Image (cartoon, grey):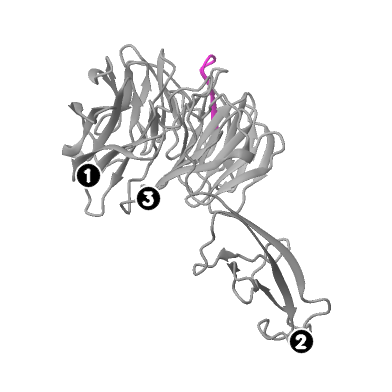
Amino acid sequence: MSQVVNIGVFDPSSITIAAPSQQTFASDGRYVFELSTATSNALAIGTHSSNLELRLCQDDVRICKQPVAGSPWIVPLSIKVLSPTNLTSLKAVDGLGAWSTYQGNAAHTGYVAASFDPAVFSRRWKVASQSSYTGNYTSAAIDNGRAFFVRRTASGRAELYAISEDRGEQAWKVDLGTLSQLNPPAAANGRVYLTSTGHSDTFLWVYDQVSGRLIRQESMSSQWPSYSAPTVLGTDVYTIDGYYGGISKYGDAEGKFIWRGPATAYEGWSPSTDGRFVYAYSTPDNTLQVFDAANGNLAYSIGDPYPYSTYFVSSAVVLTDTQQAIVGGGSLTAFDLNGHKRSWILSGSSTGTPAYGNGTIYALGASGRSLEARAPATGNLLWTVSLLEGGSYTNVIVTRNLAFVSSDSSTQAIDLVTQKVVWTYPMGGSLAISASGVLYVLDASGALAAVNLR
């Protein structure tokens, strides 16, 4: 019978603390210890050094009268404590514009045409949560130096916030009352656009970005759904509208009603547009619906009901520069917009909306535990990366050299060349990158963190 060996990690300096004994181990046989800084020993900004003592003992590691040969081992430790805020001067990044809506733009690609160095990332500021729940489909819009997002207070009131990108200070807040559901905002044209849903609570709201003044409140119809942000292209705004699903178009930057179309889809979606057509994915019959952007008429649809069961949820249509439409959230499907046909489908366990950039599709596979790079024409796998522990990852956005992924509790950056995780952040949620090169993480409680990428 083999002898029991207990393992413990000790820090004589008391800079860190760990459980005195650890019995859990990783799948590859490694033992994993979680250390945290001691709450009674707040560390000053700067670098702190210590030596950890690793003990393997046949008895209690705190006594260790029966050590394993060679135990204990001394492991050097260095902790660098950074300032919680780094309010460096902001400067526009060449080629970047506003993050106006869900996944950044009207094509929902989640792509920004810039490169960033993980070695210089630093937290800019963090706005703490003031509520317990914002909604099922949370995202922020970033425009003109402000971040816009919604929260629901503990008493159930719906609120729209504007936060300055420079210092993380509240520019204004609007209390919209006890609405059934307030959905995430879009921002463009000096305006903030958002919808509320739930029978008599269903409206399109348009606010002034600078003052928070209500410009228009347009009545719409719905049952009890939650949606992603409206989609803005130029001065045109597209949003969900209809008791059994549908799309409406509003124009002239003020939210003037233009047309309403009969699209069908599940919760969590947002229309996509290239200016000529508007795209929606119909989950009941697995077809892509394509509407004329000028009048809302159905131009064509692609796909018959697929011969076996597929499940799609909460994924907007992603439009590529190769005239394809990509849909994720369960299976991963590509549609050929020139040939009006389904190009390929990968039945599997993808999560969230894929991103598209650098001529590549980036999708979260293995139920959100891996990042996959795929060829748009065929869906063939180019490479895959297993993500670090942190739950199921459901958000992905991409730059020229990095992919950012997030779960409910963690955000990671993956180098697209080495396919290695090169940066982690202990907070998860929806992701956005501003024109100033600031990464935003908005969690489901309404906490918002800004990270300098430059």
Residue position for label 3: 128
State the residue in front, 215 or 91: 91
Q: Residues within 10 Å of mark 3 (few under 14, many from 20)?
A: few
Residue position for label 2: 66
Task: Where is residue 286? Give x, y as percent.
Answer: 45, 32
Residue visible at 47% across and 45% down in the picture: 85
Q: Residues within 10 Å of mark 2 (few under 14, many from 20)?
A: some
| Above-or-below relation of 76 to 197 | below
Q: Which of pointers 1 and 3 indicates the residue nearer the eye? A: 3
Residue position for label 1: 180
Task: Where is residue 320? Give x, y as percent.
Answer: 54, 22
Residues at marks 1 and 3, CA–CA distance in whole angstroms: 24 Å
User: What's under tag 2, amino acid-wise?
Assistant: Gln
Q: Quadrant of the N terminus?
A: bottom right
Going by the image, does 89 lie left or right of 1? left
Going by the image, does 99 lie left or right of 116? left
